[in-house]
Amino acid sequence: MPYLTAQNDITALIAKFAQAKILWVDTEIADYKSNPRLSLIQVLADSTDSSGDATFLLDVLDQSELAKNFINQIMVNPNIEKVLHNASYDIRFLGNDDAQNVTCTLKMVRKIPTYILPLPNRQLKTLIETLCGIVYVDKTEQSGDWAKRPLTQKQLEYAKMDAVYLAKVHRRLLEILAQCYPEPATENLTALDEKYQEIESKWKPLDSEIAELKERFKAGMMAQKLKDSYYFQLSSSIMMKVDFMTLARVTQTQGIELNFPVTLTKEIQKQLGQLIADPSLELEEIASWRLNSNLQQRRKSTKKIAPEPESEDLTALGERYKEILPEWKLLDSEFEHLKERIKKAMLVQNPENTPHFKLSSSSILKVDFARLAKLAVSVGVELDLMVTLTQYIQKRLGEAINKIDVQIEYITSWRMTAKTVEDEDEEIPF
């Protein structure tokens, strides 16, 4: 476990790692609640290491040049695969959007259906204990004082093993994903069809009831003016939108390059007219395939007459939701997994249809905002559409956002988060 504190040693090691094909990377953050900054970068290049002896600990606390060097040579290098858990957090300190070829084990585990890998949550500790046969992993040092020097031996031991565990989890997830998604060309479509019908008959009634319970719970909480209950909490967010031409003119006059995709709906295509063929737009056509059932089964509605939202018994609704949620989650994950496998197999094997399914295709046109804005302003065409001001757009606009007039509209949306679900990333959208 080389623990490097000298600038020359860290710089030399970064140059060495810049030649690697894959690295397992973790970080420890100092003062993460008040003034978060990098304390350690843990790097492992040997996935077979089980002791942590091959983990390098780079002490970069308050040494921004070293961190910048690591970002420039490692994180933005597309030839090096960087594996991290919950990568979106770490790359906030390691290059943000400039980081390339990043593999996130949290995203990997989300691709694995719940019925294949049922987990109470997707934290690294849970994955280590579940996938790697390790009975208990002590994560108490995760919330330790990483701004204090010298670091304790316990902190160093914890830091080195996190990279080892990450590599082990990554290897197991690759194995499980390979089993989850066999080669589409070899799939038995008849067997998949039969299994799909079996699962669908169990899934439909539960899915219908889950949807009804969520709607009733949301309506009840809003009518009873509750933002928090024993089972759920409601939160609001604000979305800002602005007229396309207003944004286009501001970016053109201020010389701001905004690069994000705009979907060309039929209405926008109609407004563009012959301009849609202008080569400067560089249109991107994205094809999608939809799996449709050949069997139109009529099913009796299970929806009951619900009481008025003001008089809903939210406790009873919550208890019922909690009761059927585990079974629904397992069935829903298998249902979606089967659909995905059938769709991929049909695309590869190219049958016109199966006894139960047929494929239909559609396509959408997308264009980069900057190109569309430049063309619209230059030729004087007025496009009537609204653009959502995402955080990316707001950041790129900077002070220029103050030049946008009152056409900005604020939209309130509601989300209901299940407090009984342990996984921190589980949300129920409405």
Image (cartoon, rainbow, N blue to C red):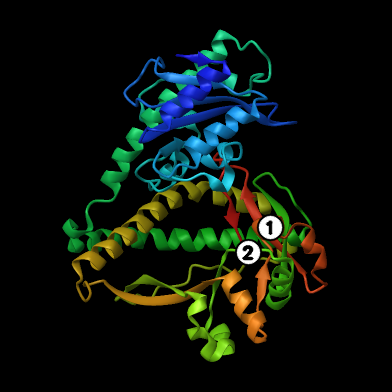
Q: How many marks?
A: 2
Residue 16 higher or lower than 90, as above or below: above
Q: In this image, 398 relative to 131: left or right?
A: right
The residue shown at (35%, 76%) is 361
Expressed as whole percent of the image width and height from the top left, the position of residue 94 reads 57, 37
Which residue carries the number 1 mark?
A: 396
Residue 325 higher or lower than 370, as above or below: above
Instruction: Give residue 258's mark.
Output: 2
Q: Name which quarter of the figure residue 421 lies in.
A: top right
Expressed as whole percent of the image width and height from the top left, the position of residue 352 reads 21, 76
Expressed as whole percent of the image width and height from the top left, the position of residue 219 reads 69, 63
The residue shown at (71%, 47%) is 229
Q: Secondary structure at mark 1?
A: helix
Q: Is residue 86 visible?
A: no
Q: Which amino acid type corresponds to the residue marked 1 in the rendered image?
A: Arg
Expressed as whole percent of the image width and height from the top left, the position of residue 285 reads 42, 74
Depth check, front residue: 113 or 151 = 151
Q: Secondary structure at mark 2?
A: loop
Q: Is residue 263 visible?
A: yes
The residue shown at (27%, 45%) is 178
**How far, Cα to Cα, is label 2 from label 1?**
7 Å
Sequence-wise, which precedes: disc 2 or disc 1?
2
Q: Name which quarter of the figure residue 425 lies in.
A: top right
Depth check, front residue: 347 or 82 = 82
Residue 32 higher or lower than 367, as above or below: above
Q: Which amino acid type corresponds to the residue marked 2 in the rendered image?
A: Leu
Depth check, front residue: 407 or 247 = 247
Q: Name which quarter of the figure residue 413 lies in.
A: bottom right
The answer to whether marks 2 and 1 mark residues whose Cβ atoms lie closer than 8 Å is: yes
